[in-house]
Image (cartoon, rainbow, N blue to C red):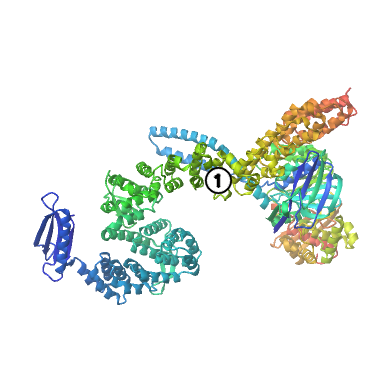
């Protein structure tokens, strides 16, 4: 999809001798959203915005080395070697060697002479690339102004990192005019450096408004971007919602523990696999993080409070370095892990600011590449009218829980949950991992209409996800059988037998919550053997859940 | 001399008469001999006339030949050809007609016209022959053929009209051709001047925009029209289209035939060279094509090796005929055939095939007389006769028809100036020894091109000739332009030399100076600028003013390319006073708006000459210029910055923070000269809080020199929040030496301590100093001990042994000194 942004002003930070101002220019093609305030702790916001910038410009994908020069050198050596074989006379050989020495000397001198030119050319190329890249590739973050907080959300360039910076109400000492809503902000590459001038001793005004720091003369457009926003980028936002609503293992980490891990990662580079960051969680014991392949063990200060011992491996650990700016100002960090090779979240508590870093299972596996985490949660579709009402209620309250919305709209809690999930799926709402509440956030500028509500409800997951569709076919054809259900504190553990669409009979097992969410799963199918849950649940697990929920709701069709 | 003429009489017994010119026994005298008889071996009746001197012998020969012709003798073979024209075999008839044409046998015209009146397959050969003979009686027949639909007949007719010089018929044929062209091509062609060859690329572009299947026929029609523009466009178009494609190939062959009929060596050369080159990579294809002859569709090979080889050989046969029947044209045509070849067409010698062995026509022209090579008809290539034959005998002339080359030596100049193949150029260079005055006939463009050939003797001769022709007191500027614009270094060097020689003339002429400073050649522009700058001091004031005005006017026009006006700027710098007097502030500001570096540079010159450029520009304009991505505009700021008085401090601070390093550095240097005596804390922090390392460095130096003027505690507490790692060492050192006692002061430094200790790329020594400072201050009182213990406790779990040990030791010492301090370390049994 094409994302069009238009900024009449430029974002920036200006610092005078007595006071300063940080201003983010908002996208004038979207609904009017603005915020004016005065910052109490400028240096904390500075570090958080710096980290957000690092995420936005971050690209940790594998970049193959440029071997052109090396190959040319190798070819030249081959040529010389062959030429030396042909040259039989010792005198000629000697002369050739002398010529080579002279040639090398001339090459060196030429290099010295051309150094300023090469340097200038490199700088020019950097400048051109940076400017061009910013205009055509940099996806501007989304800012949402709510009564209790202003939060910025962004994805990295490689779509493997998600960042959410939420500035609480008490960060601002004085509030000016506020218009709640969501919009994009102009986030240029040079902005991070300007933000570095933020200090707490200097009175700093913070504005999120169309004009930004400086409005161009004659009302000309300062910057206009038309970015081909990848579908994956949009889906990435939705995947985050799916993952944050899952049952996640979590534990506290002291900033020095995180510092130790990041420092070790930066000090040396793993040349061989495995390259995971392995968390060893044992109830009542201190959490251990192990860096593979060196098996460097970091025993954290915090004790794991979970009920079950687990070892969870996560990849793409080098992305953690975007948190390094936050370490000196962080009070604590909470880590949320979804499971083996699945996404993880690091929530840094900076006092008035919270910074959430979400990392996909590994760097090359972006948030949407083959993953279907939203399938883990169960959705009971609300009617389109209900969904529209739910959206209106959430927009009015800006932030609310499912229970509150159920009470306000009169829709059953199950349907409200399903509806909220649908709203998250279409980018109309977001789930706050820290607060556990749902927030209104329109990812795109167009309004939410009944037609879209119909699409959101009718185009269920089964239309988009082949696993969900296959599970429905299995369930409808009666090829799923429940074998055993065992109640546990968090729900039930269910095992069954499924005849898959491929004709193979497999044995899925799920740990399902009372709301129908798959907390854990296991299956004897080949897909699960290969990928585990890193790509979401397989069709058999989903079919088993359908069968279980059907029985739980008194339906038929289960033997 | 030494030539003989054979004549034939169809009825008399002594049917053969041979007239020859022979040397007489007397030196320098010649005899004219007439021998007659029934056959070549039986010439019984021999008569001698003379002795004559050369001129008399020529006249005597003419008289004798005329006498014989009046007796009924005709050229030997002519009668046979007349008989052959009546042959039953089409091939025989065609050969006879073509031969009669090449020999321009006027007596065959009647027979040919009679033959042309009956529709036959070989009519094209007859029409060609009629054209070559050039008898006006043939015009009606040829005109009717020129209007035919069938390509071979129309081609023969149009080209015959051209040879006959029938202007009216040709105009008619051209009109018909124009209407056969597609509408877009027609439109463009009609809008252009027929004689303007430079418009050919535009026409080619339109042709190439036509469907591929139509491109061939369009190019052939353009060539048929025969105007300079259409011919050039056809020639260029054939280089751009995919020749081996069906529906293009047949028309490429047609153009080749037309070019041979016109003796257009340049087109034949270009086309043949491309065909030869393509045939090395392309084996042709098969396609079902409709015949233009009978309208039948047949599956035929296109661009087959056989056809290509046939064409290569036919071009050589044609060239031999040119040598025989139009000897004056041979050298020129052969030279143009050689021009397209380059050394890149040569192959690596193997299997006894020499470098030029696969360039058939080139090899024929350059080495036809050589006994060292044998022709491999199967592969259409040449091989060395033996290994011994690889080396050419010194001084031997191997080219075909050397006497024709020497008879028309102008062709050598074509080779010397245009040929790229080393062997061809070498042959022409050798000819310069035989024709020492030949180079004097060369045009200046040819001479300039010769300077680019890699033959020392040629370059020397061309240089000498050019220097001989060049008069420094009345310089030929067109020649200078040509030399300086040449892509060859030696030509450029000579141009620069001549430019310098004539400097005393042109540097005093502002019009000429501006023209030279604006020339296309960057080397020429630079040299001209240098020469003008060197002589500017001696120019009369009026000339200087005139030149300044012209330069200002020149830079306000757009630059054709980046740096095209650099020469103007160089000269403008030495005319600073005149330019400043001419251009006011407003005009200078308007120059800065232009999209031109030269205009900005002139504005810079104007502003630099002013006493208060900052005041004239205003701070916002200075900032805008400093932020510009054009270096020339930033240079204006640099120039302004370098002037006294020192700019405003706030402006300097802003300039020191722009994105461009050059401005930042200049502003930082000026910041060092700021009088800090009036600085308050806000001003100091404005300076120290910079995010730029240059400014930080300048600020650190200034602060250290003026420590007594500032409240170090306040500065330190603010610097503690500085995020730049490069400032941390400085602040820590300052804190160690100047931080006053007390908890509050220490507490304000906490962000700095944490930044140092939580740095993931730490400075070990700095970290140690921070840890030491914390312990030292913690030991002073309980409140500070609490703060120090809190920070040390946070890093106690560091994975770095050094930090952990020092933190632990510090905590223990703090605990021992103040047991009430909250700390993760608990001491047991301590007293």
Disc 1 on helix, strand or loop? Answer: helix
Quarter of the figure that contains the N terminus of chain A:
bottom right
Indicate the quadrant where residue B715 lies: top right
Q: Is residue B351 left or right of residue A192?
A: left
Residue B460 pos. (x, y %):
36, 41
Residue A31 point in image, percent of width and height: 79, 58
Quadrant occupied by the C terminus of chain A: bottom right
Q: Residue A27 appears in which quarter of the rendering?
A: bottom right
Direction top: furthest residue: B831
Count of numbered circles on the image:
1
Q: Badge 1 sits on which subunit?
A: B
Residue reaching furthest bottom?
B118
B652 sits to left or right of A83: right
Give whichever of B507, A325 is nearer the camera: B507
Q: Where is residue A207 drawn, in percent x and y? A: 80, 48
Front residue of this view, candidates B30 and A34:
B30
> Counting other residues with Cα less than 10 Å from the Cα at mark 1, is it few (<14), some (14-19), or many (20 or more)?
many
| Residue A317 can be seen, yes or no | no
Would you place residue B391 above or below residue B284 in this image? above
From the image, tell me which residue sits under label 1. Answer: B551
- B480 horizontally vs A246: left or right: left
Residue A12 visible in the current orientation: yes
Q: Which residue is drawn at 36% across and 60% down?
A: B264
> Closest to the observer: B73 or B743?
B73
């Amino acid at each position: 999809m094409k994302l069009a942004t238009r900024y009449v002003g430029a974002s920036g930070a200006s610092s005078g001798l007595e006071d300063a101002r940080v201003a983010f220019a908002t996208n004038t093609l979207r609904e009017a959203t603005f915020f004016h305030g005065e910052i109490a702790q400028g240096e904390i916001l500075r570090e958080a915005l710096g980290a957000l910038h690092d995420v936005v410009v971050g690209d940790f994908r594998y970049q193959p080395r440029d071997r052109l020069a090396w190959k040319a050198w190798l070819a030249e050596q081959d040529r010389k070697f062959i030429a030396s074989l042909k040259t039989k006379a010792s005198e000629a050989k000697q002369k050739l060697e002398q010529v080579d020495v002279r040639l090398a000397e001339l090459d060196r001198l030429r290099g010295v002479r051309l150094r300023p030119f090469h340097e200038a050319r490199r700088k020019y190329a950097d400048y051109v690339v940076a400017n061009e890249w910013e205009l055509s590739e940099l996806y501007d973050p989304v800012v949402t102004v709510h009564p209790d907080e202003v939060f910025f959300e962004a994805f990295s360039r490689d779509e493997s990192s998600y960042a959410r910076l939420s500035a609480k109400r008490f960060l601002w000492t004085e509030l000016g005019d506020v218009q709640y809503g969501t919009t994009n902000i102009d986030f240029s590459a040079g902005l991070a450096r300007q933000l570095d001038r933020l200090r707490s001793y200097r009175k700093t005004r913070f504005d999120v408004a169309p004009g930004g720091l400086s409005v161009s003369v004659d009302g000309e457009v300062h910057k206009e971007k038309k970015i081909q926003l990848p579908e994956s980028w949009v889906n990435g936002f939705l995947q985050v919602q799916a993952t944050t609503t899952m049952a996640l293992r979590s534990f506290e980490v002291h900033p020095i523990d995180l510092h130790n891990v990041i420092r070790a990662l930066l000090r040396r580079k793993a040349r061989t696999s495995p390259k995971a960051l392995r968390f060893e969680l044992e109830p009542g014991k201190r959490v251990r993080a192990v860096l593979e392949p060196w098996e460097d063990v970091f025993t954290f200060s915090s004790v794991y409070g979970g009920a079950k011992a687990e070892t969870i491996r996560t990849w793409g650990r080098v992305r953690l370095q975007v948190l390094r700016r936050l370490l000196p100002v962080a009070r604590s960090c909470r880590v949320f892990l979804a499971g083996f090779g699945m996404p993880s979240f690091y929530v840094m508590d900076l006092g008035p600011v919270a910074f959430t870093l979400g990392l996909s299972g590994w760097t090359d596996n972006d948030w949407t590449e083959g993953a279907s985490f939203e399938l883990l949660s169960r959705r009971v579709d609300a009617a389109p009218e209900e969904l529209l009402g739910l959206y209106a209620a959430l927009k009015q309250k800006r932030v609310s829980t499912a229970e509150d919305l159920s009470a306000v709209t009169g829709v059953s809690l199950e349907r409200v949950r399903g509806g909220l999930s649908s709203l998250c799926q279409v980018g109309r709402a977001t789930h706050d991992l820290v607060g556990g509440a749902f927030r209104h956030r329109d990812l795109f500028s167009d309004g939410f209409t009944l037609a879209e509500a119909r699409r959101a409800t009718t185009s269920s997951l089964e239309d988009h996800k082949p696993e969900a569709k296959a599970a429905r076919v299995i369930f409808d054809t009666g090829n799923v059988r429940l074998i055993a259900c065992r109640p546990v504190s968090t729900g039930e553990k269910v095992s069954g037998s499924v005849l898959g669409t491929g004709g193979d009979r497999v044995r899925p097992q799920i740990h399902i919550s009372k709301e129908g969410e798959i907390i854990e799963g296991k299956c004897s199918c080949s897909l699960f053997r290969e990928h585990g849950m890193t790509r979401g649940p397989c069709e058999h697990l989903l079919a088993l859940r359908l069968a279980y929920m059907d029985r739980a709701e008194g339906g038929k069709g289960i033997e | 001399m030494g030539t003989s003429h054979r004549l034939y009489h169809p009825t008399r017994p002594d049917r053969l008469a041979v007239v020859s010119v022979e040397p007489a026994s007397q030196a320098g005298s010649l005899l004219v001999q007439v021998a007659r008889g029934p056959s070549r071996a039986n010439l019984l009746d021999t008569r001698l006339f003379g002795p004559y001197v050369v001129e008399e012998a020529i006249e005597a020969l003419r008289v004798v030949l005329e006498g014989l012709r009046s007796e009924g003798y005709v050229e030997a073979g002519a009668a046979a050809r007349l008989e052959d024209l009546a042959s039953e075999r089409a091939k025989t008839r065609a050969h006879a007609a073509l031969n009669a044409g090449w020999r321009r046998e006027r007596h065959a015209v009647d027979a040919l016209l009679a033959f042309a009146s009956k529709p036959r397959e070989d009519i094209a050969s007859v029409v060609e022959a009629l054209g070559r003979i050039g008898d006006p009686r043939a015009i009606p027949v040829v005109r009717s053929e020129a209007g035919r639909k069938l390509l071979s007949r129309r081609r023969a007719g149009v080209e015959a009209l051209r040879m006959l010089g029938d202007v009216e018929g040709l105009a008619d044929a051209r009109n018909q051709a124009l209407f056969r062209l597609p509408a877009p091509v027609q439109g463009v062609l009609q809008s252009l001047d027929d004689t303007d060859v430079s418009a050919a690329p535009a026409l080619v572009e339109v042709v190439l925009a036509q469907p591929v299947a139509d491109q061939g026929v369009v190019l052939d029609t353009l060539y048929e029209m025969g105007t300079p523009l259409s011919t050039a466009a056809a020639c260029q178009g054939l280089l751009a289209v995919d020749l081996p494609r069906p529906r293009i190939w047949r028309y490429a062959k047609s153009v080749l035939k037309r070019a041979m009929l016109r003796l257009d060596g340049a087109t034949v050369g270009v086309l043949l060279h491309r065909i030869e080159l393509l045939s090395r990579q392309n084996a042709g294809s098969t396609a079902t094509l409709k015949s233009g002859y009978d309208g039948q569709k047949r599956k035929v090979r296109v661009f087959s090796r056989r056809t290509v080889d046939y064409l290569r050989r036919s071009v050589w046969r044609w060239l031999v005929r040119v040598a025989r029947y139009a000897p004056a044209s041979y050298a020129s045509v052969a030279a143009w055939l050689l021009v397209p070849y380059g050394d890149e067409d040569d192959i690596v010698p193997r299997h006894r095939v020499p470098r030029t062995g696969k360039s058939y026509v080139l090899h024929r022209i350059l080495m036809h007389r050589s006994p060292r090579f044998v022709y491999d008809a199967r592969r259409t290539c040449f091989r060395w006769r033996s290994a011994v034959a690889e080396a050419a005998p010194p001084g031997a002339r191997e080219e075909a028809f050397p006497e024709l080359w020497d008879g028309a030596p102008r062709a050598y100049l074509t080779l010397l100036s245009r040929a790229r193949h080393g062997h061809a150029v070498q042959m022409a260079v050798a000819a310069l020894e035989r024709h020492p005055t030949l180079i004097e006939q060369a045009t200046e463009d040819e001479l300039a091109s010769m300077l680019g050939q890699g033959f020392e003797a040629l370059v020397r001769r061309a240089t000498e000739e050019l220097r001989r022709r060049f008069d420094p007191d009345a310089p030929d500027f067109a020649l200078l332009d040509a030399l300086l614009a040449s892509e060859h270094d030696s030509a450029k060097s000579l141009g620069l030399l001549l430019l310098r020689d004539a400097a005393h003339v042109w540097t005093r002429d502002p019009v000429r100076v501006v023209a030279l400073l604006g020339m296309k050649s960057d080397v020429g522009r630079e040299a001209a600028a240098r020469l003008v700058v060197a002589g500017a001091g001696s120019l009369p004031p009026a000339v200087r003013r005139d030149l300044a005005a012209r330069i200002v006017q020149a830079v306000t026009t757009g630059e054709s390319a980046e740096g095209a006006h650099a020469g103007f700027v160089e000269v403008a710098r030495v005319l600073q006073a005149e330019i400043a007097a001419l251009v006011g502030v407003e005009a200078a500001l308007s120059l800065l708006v232009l999209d031109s570096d030269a205009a900005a540079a002139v504005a810079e010159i104007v502003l630099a000459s002013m006493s208060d450029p900052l005041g004239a520009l205003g701070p916002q304009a200075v900032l805008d210029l400093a932020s510009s991505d054009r270096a020339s505009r930033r240079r204006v700021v640099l120039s302004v910055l370098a002037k006294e008085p020192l700019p405003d401090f706030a402006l300097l601070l802003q300039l020191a923070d722009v994105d461009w390093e050059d401005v930042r550095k200049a502003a930082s240097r000026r910041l060092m000269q700021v009088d800090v005596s009036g600085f308050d804390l806000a001003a100091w922090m404005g300076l120290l809080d910079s995010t730029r390392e240059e400014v930080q460095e300048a600020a650190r130096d200034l602060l250290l020199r003026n420590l007594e003027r500032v409240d170090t505690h306040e500065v330190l507490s603010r610097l503690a929040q500085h995020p730049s790692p490069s400032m941390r060492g400085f602040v820590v050192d300052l804190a160690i030496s100047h931080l006053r006692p007390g908890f509050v002061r220490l507490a304000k430094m906490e962000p700095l301590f944490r930044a140092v200790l939580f740095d993931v790329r730490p400075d070990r020594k700095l970290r140690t100093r921070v840890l030491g400072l914390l312990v030292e201050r913690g030991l002073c009182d309980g409140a500070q001990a609490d703060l120090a213990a809190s920070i040390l406790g946070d890093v106690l779990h560091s994975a770095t042994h050094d930090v952990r040990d020092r933190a632990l030791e510090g905590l223990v010492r703090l605990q021992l000194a103040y047991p009430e301090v909250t700390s993760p370390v608990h001491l047991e049994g301590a007293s």
